[in-house]
Amino acid sequence: MKQNFLIFIGIAAILFISSSMFTVHMTQNAIVLELQRPKETITEPGLYFKVPFIQQVKFFSNQLLDNDSEPTEVITRDKKNLLIDNFTVWRIVDPLTFLETVRDENGAHSRLDDIIYSELRVEIGTHDLIDIVTETREVIMEKVSKEANKKAREYGIEVVEVRIKRTDLPPSIADSIFRRMRTERERIAKEYRSEGKEEAQKIRAKTDKEKTILIADAYKQEQEIRGGGDAKSIKIYAESFNKDPEFYSFIRSMEAYKNSMKTGTTLLLSDESDFLEFLNKSK
């Protein structure tokens, strides 16, 4: 019986010692609560002790954390609606204040969303849409990060950086803009097509003109060459005729006979016809 009692005492002692010890890692801060009231803040890593059942320990990360906010709609200086999707990099720098104000990371996310949205709305409202999209985004986010950090300090939070992931137009406005863009592109396309048709007509007219000129020049050259050939031919015939008129007459008559007296041809001529002169002589 005594031995069992000693074993029970030993187990109870072990449980008491283990429940009174806790470890704070280098990535954590801790707050010791006594009857739900903060008693001690621990920021250095190591092994610590607490009173079991009376004291409790709440741990908080001291690493960089991120808060991915839902896209929010803001209005620019030139009255354009803009959908901003942003995220925040932050850390807990005062665990006690953090515990007393927002309790946990979920509460911190909710409070950060309110702070960041408020600062984005104020800062973006001082810039035009084109500047936000192209030139001044870095400057805007630096200022938003700085102002948000000032307000977040009240909750034991340090805002390291606020960044925009994506900038869009609200769906209703985007559809309207896309329709206008499509209409404008169609108008430009029609202008290009009209200019192309006009240019094509000019090219065709110029080509037809050049074609007509080329054909006229070719016909002129053809007539000149043909005229020159006919003149030479006539000249040759004339010279040949002058050299031997009877032979020339004979050759011409033979060609006429050949061309007129083909198969199936019937000629009715007088035997005194000049056309039959050489045939009559052959008898």
Image (spheres, rainbow, N blue to C red):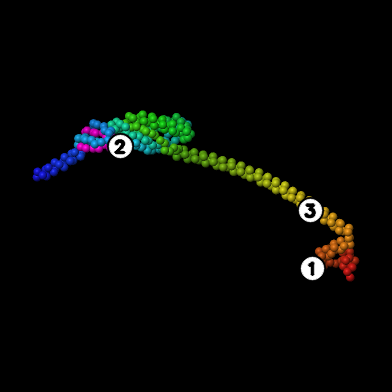
Task: Give 137 or 126, whichever is nearer the viewer.
Answer: 137
What residue is shown at x 70% (from left), y 48% (from top)?
211
- Residue depicted at x 40% and y 36%: 86
Residue 180, position as x, y percentages in the image: 51, 39
Across and down, in percent, residue 25 comes to 28, 37
Residue displayed at 89% across by 65% down: 277
Q: Is residue 140 above or below residue 208?
A: above
Location of the N terminus by quadrant is top left
Residue 53, visible in the rendered structure: no
Disc 2 element: loop
| Three-letter code, disc 1 | Thr
> Is residue 24 highlighted in magenta?
yes
Between the residue at mark 3 and the residue at mark 1, the CA separation in whole angstroms equals 33 Å
Quadrant of the image occupied by residue 236: bottom right
Query: Which of the 4 image quadrants contains residue 102?
Result: top left
Front residue (pair 51, 258): 51
* Kind of residue sitting beneath label 2: Thr
Q: Which mark is residue 226?
A: 3
Instruction: Give the residues in magenta.
Output: 20-35
The residue carrying mark 1 is: 263
Q: Give the residue number, with chain letter if any, for mark 2.
A: 27
| Residues packed near mark 2 inside 10 Å, few (<14), some (14 to 19) or many (20 plus) | some
Tell me if 180 is positioned left or right of 8 in this view.
right
Q: Is residue 28 magenta?
A: yes
